[in-house]
Image (spheres, helix red, strand yellow):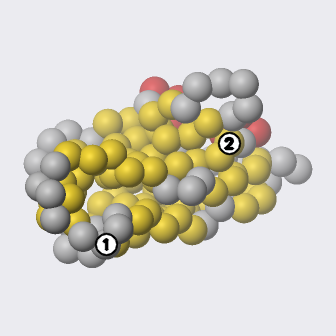
Amino acid sequence: QVQLKESGGGLVQPGGSLRLSCAASGGIFRINSMGWYRQVPGKERELVAAVPSGGKTNYAEFVKGRFTISRDNAKNTVNLQMNNLTPEDTAVYYCNAQLVVLTTFRNREVWGQGTLVTVSS
């Protein structure tokens, strides 16, 4: 069974940094894209950044210049380095993978359980 395991959330002061990590495991034939989304109560989940295989990395406008996403294809991992955090970045961050399942060769979208990032003094 395909799973995404996230780590790295927590409490940080404004202007601080956090690094989120996500590892995919379990019956994966190919990962087409990995990325991070975030959601705050009462709002829709929104893209933060994503790395498609062989394509251009996508960043939301509100994180450009502050966040950096990196992906290790060999390890099926994706990291999000978040710098200069503001209270508006407070949200639950979700890892996302769009992949092909090994046993069925079907496309599937998988989500992590979410990790809370709180930016507060």
First in sequence, mark 1 or 2: give its number: 1
Return the x and y of residue 60 as percentages of the image width and height. 44, 31
Disc 1: CA contacts within 10 A as few (<14), some (14-19) or many (>=20): few
Q: Looking at the picture, does residue 57 appear above or below residue 78?
A: above
The residue located at (55%, 32%) in the rendering is 45
The residue located at (57%, 40%) in the rendering is 38
For badge 1, the amino acid type reads: Gly
Place residue 105 in its image quadrant.
Answer: bottom left
Q: Is residue 10 left or right of residue 108?
A: right
Q: Looking at the picture, does residue 1 appear above or below residue 82?
A: below
The residue located at (76%, 57%) in the rendering is 12
Q: Looking at the picture, does residue 60 appear above or below residue 90?
A: above
**Secondary structure type for disc 2:** strand
The residue located at (27%, 75%) in the rendering is 75
| Residue farthest to the front, as pictured | 104
Judging by the rendered image, the residue that carries numbered circle 2 is 91
Return the x and y of residue 107 as percentages of the image width and height. 20, 46
Q: Are marks 1 and 2 in contact (CB under 8 Å)?
A: no
**Secondary structure type for disc 1:** loop
Return the x and y of residue 89 as percentages of the image width and height. 66, 39
Estimate the spatial distance between the alpha carbons at disc 1 and disc 2, rounded to whole Å: 27 Å
Disc 2: CA contacts within 10 A as few (<14), some (14-19) or many (>=20): many
Q: Camera-side residue: 44 or 72?
A: 44
Q: Looking at the picture, does residue 92 appear above or below residue 23?
A: above
Judging by the rendered image, the residue that carries numbered circle 1 is 26
Q: Is residue 67 left or right of residue 96?
A: right
Place residue 104 in its image quadrant.
Answer: bottom left
